[in-house]
Image (cartoon, rainbow, N blue to C red):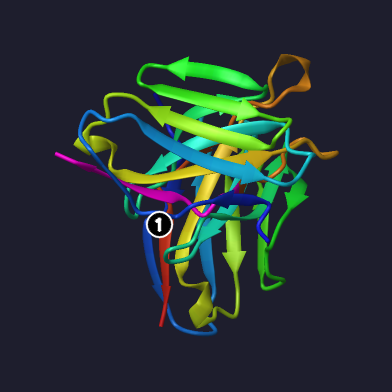
Amino acid sequence: QKEVEQDPGPLSVPEGAIVSLNCTYSNSAFQYFMWYRQYSRKGPELLMYTYSSGNKEDGRFTAQVDKSSKYISLFIRDSQPSDSATYLCASGGYSGGGADGLTFGKGTHLIIQP
Amino acid sequence: AAGVIQSPRHLIKEKRETATLKCYPIPRHDTVYWYQQGPGQDPQFLISFYEKMQSDKGSIPDRFSAQQFSDYHSELNMSSLELGDSALYFCASSSRLAGGARDTQYFGPGTRLTVL
């Protein structure tokens, strides 16, 4: 079982809809959580980064973390066709070196229909 | 803003050959990470370096090695290449914040390695 679980989709929604993307994680050592957007054959692009439980908002994006249930969410408001991409959740912790590699979910392929 | 630079962007090698991938982190970032992403897969962490010392190690094969140099750029050396090594290889960089916390990882555009 992967330490970060994510439904690969595809998830198809109409333009303007609110999108909800979710992940669960199992490693209690994870301390920080990210959402990346990846277009085909491109590098992952950072969308959101948070350390703590609760909500963090940036423009049309809201990241939500619930450490008690080990649940991570990303909400996209007013979705646009340009939001069509693969969304990766990622988690990491702090080992002795402090530069831990991230553990990714498998990514959800999102399609916004015009 | 300056981003992570990776070279080459594309590389084609034969089985059993060697390859060297290069990564230039964002200016003033002191930490680099290497990831491998196979077709349809999520990125898998290989190895990281902080201040030129190996920091964390993931699923890096023994045939691979890496190092970080005094100017903070990093190189991933891959020997005895196998067909299964064909993948996108990403480098990411981050910086250490005041108080010891770590900023997030910013990814480069990747190197696409094809082994024939």
Residue B93 versus residue B44 in the image, above or below: above
Instruction: Give the residue drawn at x 28%, y 42%.
Output: A84
B89 sits left or right of B31 in the view: left
In the rendered image, residue B57, in percent from the top left (x then y), is placed at 74, 54
Where disc 1 sits, the SS reads: loop
Q: Amino acid at mark 1?
A: Pro
Quick one: label 1, few (<14), some, or many (20+) residues within 10 Å?
some
Along the line of sight, which residue is nearer the eye, B59 or A11?
A11
Please, which chain is the residue tagged with disc 1 on? B
In the rendered image, residue B88, in percent from the top left (x then y), is placed at 45, 60
Say if the magenta span includes residue B101. no
In the rendered image, residue A98, in percent from the top left (x then y), is placed at 77, 35
Residue A78 versus residue B23 in the image, above or below: above
Residue annotated with mark 1: B8
Tell me the quarter of the image containing the C terminus of chain B: bottom left
Q: Quadrant of residue A91?
A: top right
Q: Quadrant of residue B78?
A: bottom right
Say if the magenta span includes residue A110. yes
Q: Kindly tell me whether residue B71 is visible in this rendering.
A: no
Along the line of sight, which residue is nearer the eye, B50 or B103?
B103
Q: Main secondary structure of the magenta part?
A: strand
Instruction: Give the residue drawn at x 68%, y 37%.
Output: A70
Tell me the quarter of the image containing the N terminus of chain B: top left
Instruction: Give the residue drawn at x 79%, y 39%.
Output: A29
The residue segment tinted magenta is A104-114
In the rendered image, residue A44, in percent from the top left (x then y), is placed at 44, 43
Q: Kindly tell me whether residue A78 is visible in this rendering.
A: yes
Along the line of sight, which residue is nearer the eye, B19 or B82?
B82
A36 sits left or right of B29 in the view: left
